[in-house]
Amino acid sequence: MAKAEPIGIKGLEAMHYYVRDLERSRKFYTEKLDFAEIAHSTPELEEASKQRSVVFQAGEVIVVCSQPLGEGGRAWRYLRKHPDGVGTLIFQVEDIERAFRLLDSRGGTPIDEIMRVKDEGGEFASFSITTPFGDTTFRFVERKGYRSLFPGAEHYASPRGGKNVFGISHYDHITTNFQTMAPALLWMEHVLGLERFWEIQFHTEDVHKGADHGSGLRSAVMWDPASGVKFANNEPYRPYFKSSQINIFNEEHRGDGVQHAALVVRDIIPAVEGMRKRGVGFMPTPGSYYDMMPQRLEQLGVKHIDEDVDVLRKLEILIDGEAEGKYLLQIFLKESAGMYGDPGAGPFFYEIIQRKGDRGFGGGNFRALFESIERQQKVEGKI
């Protein structure tokens, strides 16, 4: 079967996050992760949308956080069903008319017609579609000199808050959990026109034979080769389907949805050191992971790394690779609910990643990460 024609994605512009406590989000982004606060919603937009929004930015990473103002708005409808979470992913496209035509003709489900707005700089056009990503919608935008991030956004003369001292540059990928991901993969291929990029399946039973519980997944990454936009997708993997961390996410989120977003940094060691000093919590990594690291890297064909293993151990940074001179470093923040001690904050979390030639997704780290999450879930009484 011929590949579907690309819809012309230029990149992931922003992530729209719906929250119950906007001030808590402001402190997290500006004080913990050193994002700048660059804009907020106007009173007119707040009255029309029934929600208050604030925009945070670090490098090319933009996060819009919205809190409901009474009933009836998009944030209110999302949070009526879910804990805090990602309700919309926003993508820039080359040609809004072409993107709409292709998506509509291939079974995409537009929520609205193309909306057009002008300001003193130019024109903004957008439309949204439903997706198999639970209640997360996709929004596509085309900019022709339009200055604001979105209609009704009031930008500050000077950004407030952080200065991006951790060197965050852009989104690496978005990861979504499904109870069954095959329909979503087909939708991404045949509707969005994406291609299969990477896949893995893993279960802790591989190394804990005869255990009375365990956690596993099947994972497949889809991507848009032209823009580099990547979606990592997970589903639970037998045995112990119900105790899989993917299924636990689904239960806590109350449906399929975005599990985490990976943020690229220039240099992960000073970034993680700085974040830890500011009180950012990370998922723990067992010491045995670092004891086995030299042997594992040798098996992967990575005979040399630039970093000191003792420093990686101290900061609990994970490493994986595919060949000599090609590896990546990554670490995962605690999920929001655990970080705040509030189930309503939801199971979403961030990944911090630095790529040194490796284009994979840390498949060799899945076991360490899953065992780490399992220990945390035992402490919290979830398994």
Image (spheres, rainbow, N blue to C red):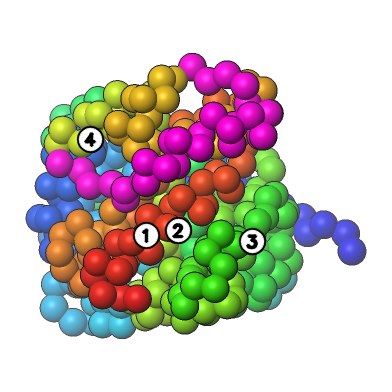
The quarter of the picture where residue 191 lies is bottom right
Tell me whether circle 1 and circle 3 mark residues in contact (CB < 8 Å): no
Sooner in the amino-acid sequence: mark 1 or mark 3: 3
Q: Is residue 338 left or right of residue 284?
A: left
- Disc 3 crowd, CA 10 A, few/some/many (<14, 14-19, 20+): some
Residue ID for mark 4: 275
Among the two numbered marks 4 and 3 on one chain, the one whose residue lies closer to the N terminus: 3
Where in the figure is residue 80, as x and y percent of width and height?
26, 82
Indicate which disc, 4 or 1, sits on the residue closer to the N terminus: 4
Residue depicted at x 20% and y 43%: 280
- The disc labelled 3 sits on which kind of residue? Gln
Q: Please name whichever residue, 7 or 164, is drawn nearer the observer in this view of the structure.
A: 164
Residue 150 sits above or below residue 337 on the image:
above
Callout 2 touching callout 4 (CB < 8 Å): no
Q: How far apart are labels 3 and 2 at the CA level?
A: 12 Å
Provide the residue designation for mark 3.
201
The alpha-carbon separation of the residues under discs 4 and 1 comes to 20 Å
Quadrant including the N terminus: bottom right
- For label 2, the residue is 370
Residue 373 image label: 1
- Residue reaching furthest front? 210
What segment carries the magenta color?
279-306
Q: State yes or no: residue 187 in magenta.
A: no
Helix, strand or loop at label 1? It is helix
| Circles 2 and 1 in contact, beta carbons < 8 Å | yes
| Distance between mark 4 and mark 3 Cα atoms | 31 Å
Q: Nearer the viewer, residue 127 or 22?
A: 22
Q: Is residue 288 magenta?
A: yes
